[in-house]
Amino acid sequence: MYAIVKTGGKQYKVATDDVITVEKIEGEAGSKVELEVIFLNDGKKIVTDPAKLAKAKVTAEILEQFKGEKQLV
């Protein structure tokens, strides 16, 4: 099972127990946040209907907040 979630204007493919790095999310380390689900695949069927996706939840825990290296353009 996996889901595509949207946060910070970007999309991420996630599955149970994945650790991902995303744009800054409001909250302290250890707090839980709910991410917007835009696609869901449970291994048997694919869900893209917005009405059904509104019922789906992906909950994440903020492990740490950090700043990455500066990007020179």
Image: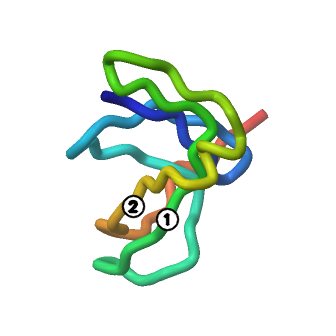
Residue 55 is left or right of residue 21, and the answer is right
On screen, residue 43 above or below 27: above
User: Which one is in front, 48 or 29?
Assistant: 48
Residue 9 is left or right of residue 60, and the answer is right
Residue flagged by tag 1: what amino acid is it? Glu
Instruction: Identify the residue at horizontal 67%, vertical 53% (top origin).
Output: 8
Q: Secondary structure at mark 2?
A: strand
Q: Which residue is mark 1?
A: 34
Callout 1 crowding tier (Cα within 10 Å): few <14, some 14–19, many ≥20: few
Q: Which residue is mark 2?
A: 59
Residue 14 position in % (x across, y down):
39, 36
Residue 10 is left or right of residue 27, and the answer is right
User: Which one is in front, 10 or 43?
Assistant: 43
Residue 69 position in % (x across, y down):
52, 49
Residue 24 position in % (x across, y down):
57, 63
On screen, residue 40 above or below 71: above
- Which label sits on residue 46? none
Residue 37 position in % (x across, y down):
57, 45
Q: Are marks 2 and 1 in contact (CB under 8 Å)?
A: yes
Instruction: Identify the residue at horizontal 57%, vertical 77% (top origin).
Output: 26
State the quadrant of the N terminus: top left
